[in-house]
Image (cartoon, helix red, strand yellow):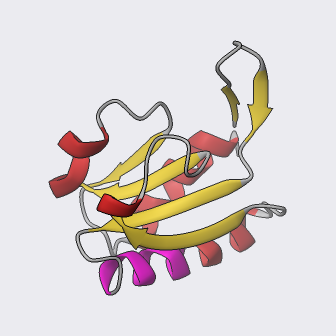
Amino acid sequence: MLKKNRKGMKMAIRSIMCCCGQGLGSSMMVSMNVEKALKNLGVTGVSVDHTALSEVNPNSADLFVVGRDLAPQVASYPNKIILDRIMDMNELTEKLKEVFGK
């Protein structure tokens, strides 16, 4: 997926940040699943990390992945995936397919 930077120019997604309340448990598991899904989709050159939502801002990554419970906190973020079921690989893979045009 290409996102637009502040000047309206398109740029490739090169970093994904998975966030949860504390940045330890669920975000770490989701980040591992994101890495697995990206590999299965043949997407390379994308770094995946995890942290607490309180530690990020919209410029911390090109794409954010959070659970539905944190959707209100990232409403203003331009590129995000909101997961209804954070451990559902099918949901995650489908949403990543949309983002990366696979």
The relative height of residue 48 versus residue 9 in the rendered view (above or below) is below
Which residue occupies 68% across, 24% down?
5
Q: How many marks?
A: 0
Magenta stretch in the rendered image? 25-33
Give the dominant element type of the magenta stretch: helix, strand or loop.
helix
Which residue occupies 62% across, 45% down?
62
Residue 16 falls left or right of residue 54 = right
Residue 55 is a magenta residue: no
Residue 20 lies, in percent from the top left, at: 29, 68
The relative height of residue 49 versus residue 102 in the rendered view (above or below) is below
Which one is nearer the viewer's eye here, 23 or 82? 23
- Residue 54, image quadrant: bottom left
Q: Quadrant of the N terminus?
A: top right
Residue 99 falls left or right of residue 69 = right
Which residue occupies 21% across, 53% down?
70
Which one is nearer the viewer's eye here, 84 or 47? 47
Residue 15 lies, in percent from the top left, at: 67, 56
- Residue 37, image quadrant: bottom right
